[in-house]
Image: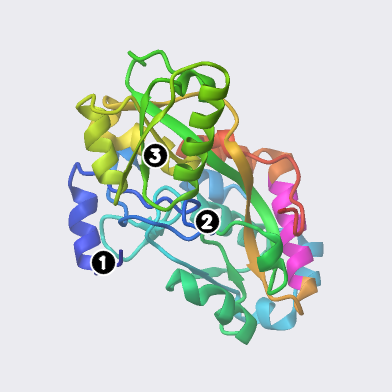
Amino acid sequence: MSRSRAAQAVLLASLAVLVTACGGGPDGAGGTSQAAGAPASGIPDTAAIVQGVQKDAQLNAALPDTVKQAGLHLASNLQSAPNNFYAADGKTPIGYEVDLAKAIAAKLGVAVTHQDMAFGSLITSLQSGRIDLTMAGMNDTKARQQQIDFVDYFTSGITIMIRKGNPDGITGPDTLCGKNVAVVQGTSHQKFATEQSAKCTQAGKPAVTVTATDSDNQNQNQLRTGRVQAILNDLPSAVYISRTAGEGKFFEVVPGEPIDGGPYGIGVNKTNTALRDAVRKALQALITDGTYGKILQAWGVEQGAIKEAAVNGGA
């Protein structure tokens, strides 16, 4: 759901947290719920990490001349905390993706500018040459690889969010049997919950009661009041909600690898292989020197870290 920047600023100043599930749409990416708001305490200070990145002269030399001269023009759908969203001023892009983009640009020795764009326009804008890169929690899939190339930078997937202190003893998918689990209608989360319920009954255990709603906000209210015992959400969103809602006192995330995980990718025009390869090498250098891990850890999403920056690694 789009919002004006002024409305986003009001939300960011409030204590409410309404977070977009970027990987949870019917096609496994896109987003299904409202834009994000968060208290200032949920925003890490990553300036020193990004400012510590040193330019690689060889990578800079390999860039297309247009990028050397004008810098990187990157488009995102700036509504998805903690991936990418607006700060309390309603105009400054922040998020772990924003920090990674700045770090990659610094390694390449160029500036990067962020443009806010509807998610459905990102690929066509990339193909037309209006932008150089996309970075918007977009799943790298075989279907999308027919249109653009990807440099994979994160692994997301379904995560189980529970009440703080885990009073219901939920430690993984198998412990959802007999529990009431909330999901957003029409998402991959709902599909997984239904499949898990079938596994429970096949094993002679109670079924999962799946409660499907229209928004993450409804699900959070139900979890807080004990009407459901768990929420299924994407990893970054679940972690961010857990850290910020009620100043971190309401929810927590069940530890472990994301369920049905897949990579998020930086989108690049298929004809611009020089830029694609330079971005991949820059990201790999950040992974190797630890900058990448520090950024993810600062935002609390280190569970989705990758070890190798692959090109078109999605299935």
| Residue 240, numbered label | 3
In the picture of the structure, the residue carrying the numbered disc 1 is: 3
Q: Is residue 251 left or right of residue 147?
A: left
Residue lying at 63% horizontally and 39% vertically, measured from the top left: 305
**Badge 1 density bin: few <14, some 14–19, many ≥20, Cα 10 Å:** few
Q: Nearer the viewer, residue 200 or 145?
A: 200
**Badge 3 density bin: few <14, some 14–19, many ≥20, Cα 10 Å:** many
Task: Give coordinates of residue 70: x percent, y percent.
Answer: 60, 80
Q: Could you tell which of marks 1 and 2 lies nearer the N-terminus? A: 1
The amino acid sitting under disc 3 is Tyr
**Badge 2 density bin: few <14, some 14–19, many ≥20, Cα 10 Å:** many
Task: Give coordinates of residue 23: x percent, y percent.
Answer: 50, 52
Task: Give coordinates of residue 218: x percent, y percent.
Answer: 24, 43
The amino acid sitting under disc 2 is Gly
Q: CA distance from mark 2 to mark 3?
A: 14 Å
Q: Nearer the viewer, residue 199 or 283?
A: 199
- What secondary structure is the magenta-colored segment mainly? helix
Range of residues picked out in magenta: 275-286
Residue lying at 39% horizontally and 39% vertically, measured from the top left: 240
